[in-house]
Image (cartoon, grey):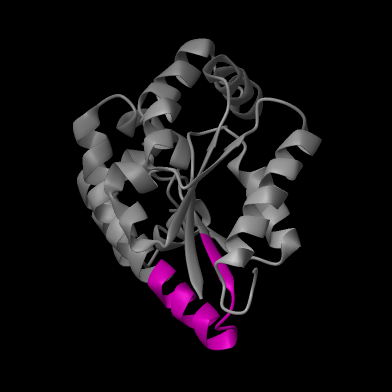
């Protein structure tokens, strides 16, 4: 099985790229969705978050209000690091379980994990290959403002909290630029998929 990491800044188009790769035959999981699951009530990360950040980050039903939590962690590096130290180990554990399940089901699979902070946390080292998705920085801010209804200041704060795309690209085995049309992005994803297939036993020349 080929283990592939896919990363990129917030609002760079990772979700669309993953959807194309999944359509082509890859197995894929979104680390953000896993992160949502590990902070559900009753899970260890939930209790640690409430103990550190307080009950003001909770909704009326007791679930974590991710917008309220995000407003706190994006105001300071120490808050962000604390949250990451709580959530990331649980996310890695869930990812490892998923990879083991895929390998058992299909030893020839291309298994992709999509995670925004893969390079920042060093977890990219766990993968055979790394794909970096990026777009023009100004377009990234615009997309985030439209998607999340952020002010420009809020959007810039979120993008600035992550490693710039030009730095992420230094770690890439493959890169996909989503600045243009969906069709252009799809064609780039198809080329990357073809390259990944060549790395599988019995594939390629």
Q: Quadrant of residue 42?
A: bottom left
Position of 197 with respect to 36 (left or right) is right
Relative image position of residue 65 (x, y in whole percent):
45, 43
Picture coordinates of residue 14, whole percent (x, y): 59, 43
- In front here: 157 or 140? 140
Closer-to-camera residue (35/175): 175
Q: Is residue 202 magenta?
A: no
Q: Residue furthest bottom?
A: 104
Quadrant occupied by the C terminus:
bottom right
Q: Is residue 132 above or below residue 86?
A: above
* Rendered location of residue 98, percent (x, y): 48, 74
- Number of numbered labels in the structure image: 0
197 vs 20: above or below: below
Q: Is residue 140 visible?
A: yes
Which residue is found at the position 42% from the left and 67% from the top?
A: 95
Look at the image and tell me whether residue 50 can be seen: no
Residue 7 drawn above or below residue 27: above
Pick out the residue farthest to the right: 183
Q: Is residue 109 left or right of residue 41?
A: right
Residue located at (68% from left, 42% from top): 188
Main secondary structure found in the magenta portion: helix
* Stretch in magenta: 95-112
Question: Is 98 part of what is drawn in magenta?
Answer: yes
């Amino acid at each position: 099985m080929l283990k592939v990491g896919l990363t990129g800044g917030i609002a760079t188009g990772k979700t669309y790229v993953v959807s194309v790769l999944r359509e082509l035959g890859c197995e894929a999981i979104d680390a953000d969705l896993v992160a949502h699951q590990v902070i559900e009530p009753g899970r260890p990360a939930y209790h640690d978050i409430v103990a550190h950040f307080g009950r003001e980050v909770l909704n009326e039903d007791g679930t974590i209000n991710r917008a309220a939590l995000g407003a706190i962690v994006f105001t300071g590096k120490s808050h962000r690091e604390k949250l990451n130290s709580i959530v990331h180990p649980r996310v890695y554990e869930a990812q490892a379980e998923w990879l083991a399940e895929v390998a058992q089901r299909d030893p020839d699979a291309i298994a992709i994990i999509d995670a925004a902070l893969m390079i920042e946390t060093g977890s990219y080292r766990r993968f055979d290959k790394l794909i970096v998705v990026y777009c023009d920085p100004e377009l990234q801010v615009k997309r985030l403002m439209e998607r999340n209804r952020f002010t420009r200041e809020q959007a810039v704060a979120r993008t600035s909290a992550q490693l710039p795309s030009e730095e992420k690209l230094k770690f890439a085995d493959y890169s996909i630029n989503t600045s243009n049309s969906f069709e252009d992005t799809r064609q780039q994803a198809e080329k990357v998929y073809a390259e990944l297939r060549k790395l599988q036993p019995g594939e390629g020349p």
